[in-house]
Image: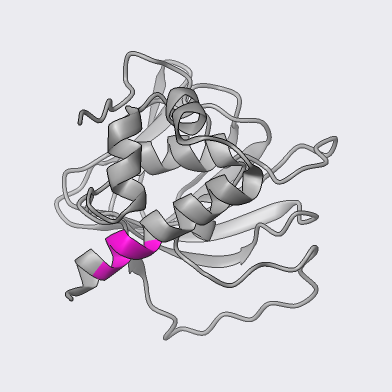
């Protein structure tokens, strides 16, 4: 089995485990995520590939951090010390071209979650998103165009942007090659549960998976 097929099966298995663990039906999760029940069923069996937008919707519906769909180890209640090494590698999101590396945070009692994101050439987030908290994005290489609440901000290496995450926002690769971004997400202080990383703000830009 090739790596993409294995990753697809692993994601499907984790989605199914999370859904069963939460005690919710296939139909309920599909409805909340704006997907068809048949597509979600095939996805759980590893017979379909989800877009990044689909995974964001499903992670939100199941109360997961997006990174939890790509790792099998359960996180502690609060991160005490976490070291990441330079050779940790990046994980791909099947069929999207995106790659990411979860650098730390995201446990139920953590306030922060940190990611290394790689935007593929000429690709952007397919939907405008909104969620509680704040986030900071620091461009390591390449160029990224951020759309925030109707305004555009073009960032080059060494530039960064701090966003009130409740404002509608999305990002796209504005350069000729890949763009690498260090992203830090902070949930609001009053939050007591696992933060939703992204929440789709507009229904018109959702990617609708069809059976």
Mark yes or no: residue 130 visible.
yes
Q: Residue at x 33, y 13 (%)?
A: 204
Q: Which quarter of the figure has residue 192? A: top right
| Residues in magenta, as a range | 6-10
Q: Is residue 130 above or below residue 51?
A: above
Q: Position of residue 166 (x, y in %)?
A: 61, 25
Q: Residue at x 31, y 47 (%)?
A: 43
Q: Position of residue 49 (x, y in %)?
A: 24, 49
**Residue 8 highlighted magenta (yes or no):** yes
Mark yes or no: residue 51 visible.
no
Q: Is residue 13 above or below residue 96?
A: below
**Residue 107 highlighted magenta (yes or no):** no
Horizontal side of 100 relative to 132 (left or right) equals: left
Q: Residue at x 33, y 23 (%)?
A: 206
Q: Is residue 81 above or below residue 166?
A: below
Horizontal side of 172 relative to 66 (left or right) equals: left
Q: Give the main secondary structure of the magenta stretch.
A: helix
Q: Is residue 140 above or below residue 15?
A: below
Q: Which quarter of the figure has residue 99? A: bottom left
Locate the C terminus by quadrant.
top left
Q: Position of residue 123 (x, y in %)?
A: 21, 43
Choose between 35 and 179: the one closer to the eye.
Answer: 35
């Amino acid at each position: 089995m090739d790596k993409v097929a294995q990753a697809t099966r692993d994601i499907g298995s984790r989605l199914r485990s999370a859904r069963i663990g939460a005690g919710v039906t296939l139909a309920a999760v599909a409805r909340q995520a704006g997907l068809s029940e048949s597509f979600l069923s095939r996805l759980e069996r590893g017979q379909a590939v989800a877009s990044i937008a689909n995974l964001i919707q499903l992670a939100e519906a199941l109360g997961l951090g997006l990174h939890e769909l790509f790792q099998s180890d359960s996180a502690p209640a609060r991160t005490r010390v976490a070291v990441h090494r330079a050779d940790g590698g990046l994980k791909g999101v099947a069929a999207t071209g995106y790659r990411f590396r979860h650098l730390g945070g995201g446990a139920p009692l953590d306030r922060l979650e940190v990611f290394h994101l790689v935007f593929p050439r000429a690709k952007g987030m397919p939907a405008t998103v909104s969620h509680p908290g704040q986030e900071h994005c620091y461009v390591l290489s390449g160029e990224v165009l951020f759309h925030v609440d109707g305004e555009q901000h073009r960032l080059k290496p060494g530039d960064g942007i701090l966003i009130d995450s409740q404002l509608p926002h999305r990002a796209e690769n504005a350069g000729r090659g890949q763009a690498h971004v260090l992203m830090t997400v902070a949930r609001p202080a009053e939050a007591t549960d696992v933060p939703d990383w992204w929440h789709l703000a507009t229904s018109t830009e959702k990617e609708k998976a069809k059976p």
